[in-house]
Image (spheres, rainbow, N blue to C red):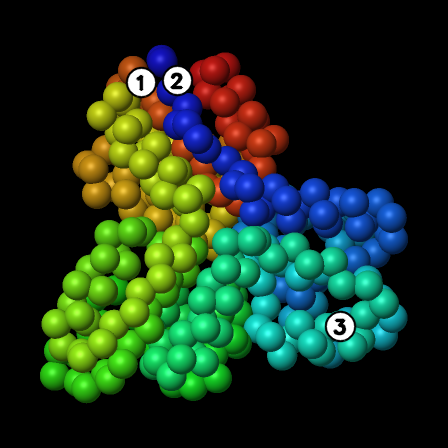
C-alpha cells in the first residue's frame, strides 16, 4: 500500500500560535481558564487539560484574578471586556486572520452596511464576529438560503475564515443581483484555502483518503466535503484508533489529510499505524 500525505496538512499558523501561547502560559502559571475549547480537537484539548487547562463557558465562570485564555476562534468584543475585568492576565490566542474578520465587521458596521456573514451561525468564530457588529446582521450558510424576493439594502459581506471560497463567491454572485450596493471582504484565510487545494490535488492520486481531525472542526469538515465531492472514498476519523481495517481492503494507494486544528502527533500516529498495516 502506497501512502501519500497532503501538503500542506495539519496545524495552521493561527492554531499553532494559539497552542504555543497556551503551553507557555500553562508552564508559567499552572492553571489557565479558557473561554470555550481553545481549538476544535478533543484529543489535543485533553492533552492540554493534563497540563492544567480548565474550560469554562462564560467569562463569569472565570475565578477572579485568574489567568484566562482567548481561543484561536476569538470572542465577541463585550466578552473580551468582561474577561479582562475578571482576570489577572488575559492571554489572547485569537488567530490574526480571525482578528482581521473582526476589524472588517467593525468597519462595515460603522459605514452603515447591513452585514452578511457567510458561515455557520452556531460556530464560536461566527458568534465572535457578530459581537463586533453594531447594526443589522445575518448569517448565511450558503447561496441556497438567500430569498431572491427580499429587500436586503446596502450589504457588507464577509466570511468565516474556514469557509470554501466557492461558497462565498456563490453568495456574493446571488446577492449582487438583488441589492443596490455590495461591499465584500474575502476573510477566508490562506491556510484554509491551501489545505482545500491540497485535497483537490490528492484525490486523483489515491484510491481513498483518510481525513483526521475533530468532528467539531469546521475546516476539517470542509476537507471531507471536498474529498467526497471528488468521488473518492473518504474516511473521517479523530485519531488512529478509529481506523477501520475493512475500509482499507482493496486500496493500493491511501491519502492522508488533516484539518488546520489537527496536531502533528495525531498525524504521526496515523501514518505509523497505516505503515504497519
* Front residue of 152 and 62: 152
- Work out how far the residue at label 2 is from the one at label 3, CA to CA, in angstroms: 47 Å
Q: Is residue 72 above or below residue 205?
A: below
Q: Quadrant of the C terminus?
A: top left
Residue named by callout 3: 84
Closer to viewer: mark 3 or mark 1: 3
- Work out how far the residue at label 3 is from the one at label 1, CA to CA, in angstroms: 51 Å
Residue named by callout 1: 253
Closer to viewer: mark 2 or mark 3: 3
- Local SS, label 2: strand
Q: Mark 1–mark 2 contact, CB under 8 Å?
A: yes
Q: Is residue 266 above or below residue 134?
A: above
Q: Say whether residue 255 is visible.
A: yes
Horizontal and vertical percent for residue 88?
A: 85, 67
Horizontal and vertical percent for residue 73?
A: 55, 59
Instruction: Name the residue at 33% across, 73% down.
Output: 156
Q: Is residue 181 above or below residue 73?
A: below
Residue named by callout 2: 3
* Front residue of 277 and 110: 110
Q: Crowdedness of circle 1 by 10 Å Cα count: few (<14), some, many (20+)?
A: some
Horizontal and vertical percent for residue 118?
A: 33, 65
Q: Mark 3–mark 1 contact, CB under 8 Å?
A: no
- Label 2 or label 3, whichever comes before in sequence order: 2
Which residue is farthest front?
A: 111
Q: Is residue 255 left or right of residue 265?
A: left
Amino acid at each position: 500500500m502506497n501512502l501519500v500525505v497532503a501538503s500542506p496538512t495539519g496545524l495552521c499558523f493561527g492554531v499553532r500560535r494559539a497552542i504555543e501561547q497556551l503551553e507557555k502560559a500553562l508552564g508559567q502559571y499552572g492553571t489557565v481558564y479558557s473561554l470555550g475549547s481553545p481549538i476544535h480537537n478533543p484529543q489535543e484539548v485533553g492533552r492540554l487539560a493534563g497540563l492544567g487547562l480548565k474550560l469554562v463557558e462564560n467569562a463569569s465562570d472565570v475565578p477572579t484574578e485568574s489567568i484566562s485564555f482567548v481561543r484561536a476562534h476569538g470572542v465577541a468584543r463585550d466578552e473580551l471586556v468582561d474577561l479582562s475585568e475578571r482576570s489577572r492576565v488575559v492571554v489572547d490566542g485569537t488567530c490574526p486572520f480571525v482578528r482581521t474578520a473582526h476589524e472588517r465587521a467593525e468597519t462595515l458596521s460603522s459605514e452603515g452596511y447591513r452585514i452578511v456573514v457567510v458561515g455557520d451561525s452556531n460556530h464560536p468564530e461566527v458568534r465572535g464576529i457578530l459581537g463586533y457588529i453594531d447594526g443589522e446582521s445575518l448569517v448565511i450558510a450558503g447561496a441556497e438560503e438567500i430569498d431572491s424576493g427580499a429587500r436586503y439594502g446596502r450589504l457588507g459581506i464577509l466570511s468565516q475564515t474556514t469557509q470554501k471560497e466557492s461558497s462565498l463567491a456563490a453568495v456574493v454572485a446571488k446577492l449582487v443581483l438583488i441589492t443596490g450596493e455590495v461591499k465584500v471582504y474575502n476573510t477566508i484565510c490562506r491556510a484554509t484555502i491551501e489545505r482545500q487545494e491540497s485535497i483537490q490535488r490528492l484525490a486523483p492520486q489515491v484510491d481513498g483518503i483518510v481525513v483526521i481531525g475533530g468532528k467539531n472542526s469546521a475546516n476539517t469538515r470542509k476537507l471531507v466535503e471536498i474529498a467526497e465531492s471528488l468521488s473518492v472514498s473518504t474516511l473521517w476519523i479523530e485519531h488512529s484508533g478509529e481506523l477501520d481495517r475493512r475500509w482499507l481492503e482493496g486500496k493500493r494507494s491511501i491519502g492522508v489529510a488533516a484539518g488546520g486544528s489537527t496536531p502533528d502527533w495525531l498525524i504521526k500516529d496515523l501514518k505509523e499505524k497505516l505503515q504497519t498495516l
